[in-house]
RNA sequence: GUGAGAGUAGCUCAGUCGGCUAGAGCACCAGGUUGUGGUCCUGGGGGUCGCGGGUUCGAGUCCCGUCUCCCACCCCA
């Protein structure tokens, strides 16, 4: 028989890797909960149309799609947002606002794998729907940083690059760009960090033939602070858009993460549906792709046949995160442990060993033993391999006076205790 | 979809100009005599050298194809 290899771009989670994955996901979960998000989940596949409706038919080639026996076109979810929108739309009027939900879906995209990007991954999603308040944007950014900080990443390690589509649009309008040129400018700004000054100037000349407009573009891409943006603005409308972003930065300051956040005019996000604040989180040293990204989208629900309601949120994938944490040596999932490992010094004690094992397990403790009736040395070796905290040895003294030997594996010390007393409260020795 | 690099044991890799039965470390299993683990010592199992074809007396080694991995580009919801 032929060996079937794993599918490319997928991962096998052997116990060690599984511990890592659980560590990451449980971190996401506890941080979400302490920031007031409620967990939800949807099906792993949806109607194909749910994904193509908003993003266009072209996206179908990036999806793993299938047809069921009823001829329905389905696809495995490549992201969570359409499912979120669908679920929220179904019960929008009944849900208390703001809707503050999180999920950690397993998603699949039919991509060519490369560093930080696989065909199957986990993506932490936090969204706040049904409010225009910049506090929602601030809370989303805070939550993402809260997690990254909780695993040991400092402001010296990572940076939240933050801008606003609304402000950028107002700025461009103020500078007399034609609305149909906005999209070109967005793409140019988005590419800016990846290009040298020369390459950027070349690309700009290609895309924006008008020298006056191009001069303005160069001015825009060089903006370093909100203050500089303010000096360029003329209309009240543009000033109002700037004030919104300024307010967000103030709130982030109050939340104590100002040192993680930085205004960056080149953050526009490719996604057409973003309408307000947009951000991406990067590591400061290496050149990994964004570890998290998000923003506000005013038409999130309307785009899926729902009411006009604004939402803001972000996604964080496990793949880049794992690379980043590995580089920083911050991946430290708790190793699996066995509380008690039972050893019989004489084979005739084995029946009793099984009984005690069961009692310890019923008491909620981890208990293990060796399948082989072999020497104490061999059994101890097995106990070590399983990362055991305490070994309980049943021996001659158990037969004589119901005593057992209990050995602290880390310290190497051992003592004797009445078996009944141990079983009364096994946790006393831990 | 485009381009580059790499595939030898479970993992990391060595393998000279094409030449004996393809190796090391780690991991795994077993021993090192009676009731004490991690260290150490000894031994063992494990390979279609990614796969297919070609050149050759002879291919892990050279050539072609293919698959996979990996990196960059495109894209990035």
Image: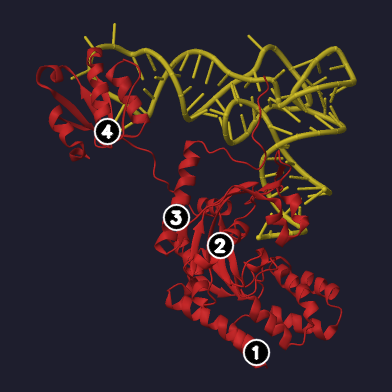
Instruction: Report crowding for label 3: few under 14, some 14 to 19, many 20 or more residues within 10 A (C-alpha).
Output: many
Mark linked to residue A362: 4
* Element on which disc 1 rests: helix
In the rendered image, which residue does mark 2 sit on? A88
Marks 2 and 3, the one that precedes in the sequence: 3
* Element on which disc 4 rests: helix
> Residue at point 71% right, 88% down?
A174
Where is residue A20 drawn, in percent x and y?
Answer: 47, 45
Quarter of the figure with the N terminus of chain A? top right
Quarter of the figure with the C terminus of chain A? top left
Where is residue A14 drawn, in percent x and y?
Answer: 51, 36
Q: Chain of mark 2?
A: A
Q: Chain of mark 1?
A: A
For marks 2 and 4, give the CA distance: 42 Å
Marks 3 and 1, the one that precedes in the sequence: 3
Mark linked to residue A297: none
- Is there any visible trace of residue A285 in the rendered image? no
Q: Nearer the viewer, residue A214 or A164?
A: A164
Q: Colour of chain A?
A: red
* Element on which disc 2 rests: helix
- Are dots 2 and 3 on a single chain? yes
> Would you say A358 lies left or right of B50 here?
left
For marks 2 and 3, give the CA distance: 20 Å
Q: Chain of mark 4?
A: A
- Are dots 1 and 4 on a single chain? yes
Which chain is tinted yellow? B
In the rendered image, which residue does mark 1 sit on? A237
Marks 4 and 3, the one that precedes in the sequence: 3
In the rendered image, which residue does mark 3 sit on? A29
């Amino acid at each position: 028989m032929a060996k079937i290899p794993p599918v490319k771009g997928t991962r096998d989670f052997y116990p060690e890797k599984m511990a890592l994955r659980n560590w990451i996901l449980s971190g996401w979960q506890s941080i979400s909960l302490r920031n007031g998000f409620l967990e939800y989940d949807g099906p792993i596949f949806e109607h194909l149309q749910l994904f193509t409706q908003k993003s266009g038919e072209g996206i179908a080639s990036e999806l793993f799609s299938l047809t069921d026996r009823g001829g329905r076109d389905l696809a495995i979810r490549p992201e969570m947002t359409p499912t979120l929108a669908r679920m929220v739309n179904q019960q929008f009027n009944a849900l208390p606002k703001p809707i503050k939900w999180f999920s950690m879906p397993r998603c699949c995209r039919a991509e060519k794998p490369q560093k930080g990007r696989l065909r199957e991954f986990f993506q932490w999603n936090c969204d706040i729907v049904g409010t225009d308040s910049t506090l929602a944007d601030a809370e989303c950014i805070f939550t993402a940083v809260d997690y990254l900080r909780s695993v040991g990443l400092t402001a010296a390690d990572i940076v939240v690059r933050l801008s606003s589509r609304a402000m950028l649009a107002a700025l461009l309008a103020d500078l007399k760009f034609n609305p149909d040129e906005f999209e070109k400018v967005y793409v140019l700004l988005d590419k800016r960090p990846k290009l040298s000054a020369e390459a950027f100037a070349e690309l700009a000349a290609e895309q924006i033939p008008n020298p006056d407009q191009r001069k303005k573009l160069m001015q825009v891409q060089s903006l370093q602070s909100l203050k500089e943006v303010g000096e360029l603005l003329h209309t009240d409308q543009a000033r109002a858009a700037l004030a919104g972003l300024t307010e967000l930065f103030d709130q982030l300051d109050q939340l104590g993460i100002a040192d993680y956040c930085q205004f960056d005019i080149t953050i526009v996000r490719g996604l057409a549906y973003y309408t307000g604040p947009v951000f991406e989180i990067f590591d400061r040293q290496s050149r990994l792709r964004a570890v998290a990204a998000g923003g506000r989208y005013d038409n999130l629900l309307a785009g899926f046949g729902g009411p006009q309601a604004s939402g803001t949120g972000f996604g964080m994938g496990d793949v880049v995160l794992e690379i980043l944490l590995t580089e920083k040596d911050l991946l430290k999932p708790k190793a699996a442990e066995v509380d008690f490992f039972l050893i019989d010094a004489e084979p005739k004690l084995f029946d009793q060993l099984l009984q005690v094992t069961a009692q310890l397990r019923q008491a909620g403790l981890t208990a293990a033993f060796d399948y082989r009736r072999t020497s104490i040395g061999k059994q101890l070796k097995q106990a070590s391999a399983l990362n055991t905290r305490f070994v309980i040895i049943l021996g001659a003294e158990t037969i004589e006076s119901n005593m057992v030997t209990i050995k602290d594996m880390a310290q190497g010390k051992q003592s004797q205790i009445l078996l009944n007393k141990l079983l009364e409260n096994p946790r006393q020795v831990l």
